[in-house]
Image (cartoon, rainbow, N blue to C red):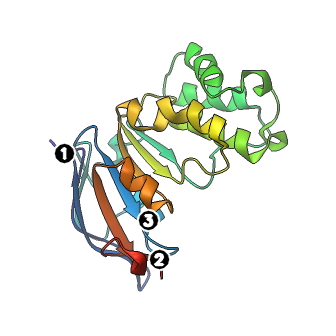
Amino acid sequence: MAAIELERLERRYGERVALAGVSVRVEEGQTLAVLGGNGAGKTTLLRVLAGLLRPHGGGACVLGASLPDERWKLPARVGYLGHEPLLYRELSGRENLRYHAALHDVRASRVDELLGAVGIADRADEPVRDLSKGLVQRLAVARAVLHHPALLLLDEPRANLDPAAGELVEPLIGRSSGRTRVLVSHDVEGALAESDVSLGLRSGRPAPIDAELYR
């Protein structure tokens, strides 16, 4: 069974078409690179795959769940790392992760394990609002993988990370994690190098991956 199977997927915002005619198949353990310029529909596609947006047409199956009817099955199995870190700014990093651990019935020791893995154990009790963008991104990575998701949806996951931090999170969200991944990136060469399947989008529709894609 494919981890992701889309057949002429459609999504609209009112009269505006955000996605149209998107078809792709991703097997378990593979990485799909989604490439395109601003407004191409990349983030919308991730949100549909996460079950956060309903498709308006076509077929969509994610981890065996048919969308939109079975999207309730996805939160426990999908890790989403988007432009927003989905962290409470007034809470500390540790408090944020403990909150998400409770939501997913994850053991408490997993929080400390991940704080160490992303290299912020010594800053974990400071409010998120006082942390740099790079440290917040590390916390967001920890939150996304906290519940051992089968599928990772990654929107520019290395944004605000220096090379050292990038190496720290690689085992969690990189190819070596062994998870099925959907990777949105403006780094075309880098994304293609770490993907098994690629999808170009322009104005919400499939397009060849070339220089025209970003114009």
The residue identified by callout 1 is: 2
Q: Residue at x 52, y 16 (%)?
A: 107
Q: Quadrant of residue 134 in the image?
A: top right
Where, by quadrant of the figure, is residue 168 drawn?
A: top right
Question: Can you give x and y, in whole percent of width and height, for residue 179 in the image?
Answer: 35, 35
User: Mark 1 and mark 2 in contact (Cβ < 8 Å)?
Assistant: no
- Among the two numbered marks 2 and 1 on one chain, the one whose residue lies closer to the N terminus: 1
Q: Which residue is mark 3?
A: 42
Label 2, residues with CA under 10 Å away: few <14, some 14-19, many ≥20: some
Question: In the rendered image, is residue 51 in sight?
Answer: no
What whole-number distance in Å separates the C-alpha atoms at marks 3 and 1? 20 Å
User: In the picture shown, does residue 67 fall above or below 110?
Assistant: below
Give the number of the mark in front: 2 or 1: 2
Q: Please name which of the two marks, 2 or 3, marks the residue nearer to the observer.
A: 2
- Looking at this view, name the residue that lies furthest to the bottom: 15
Q: Is residue 27 left or right of residue 15?
A: left
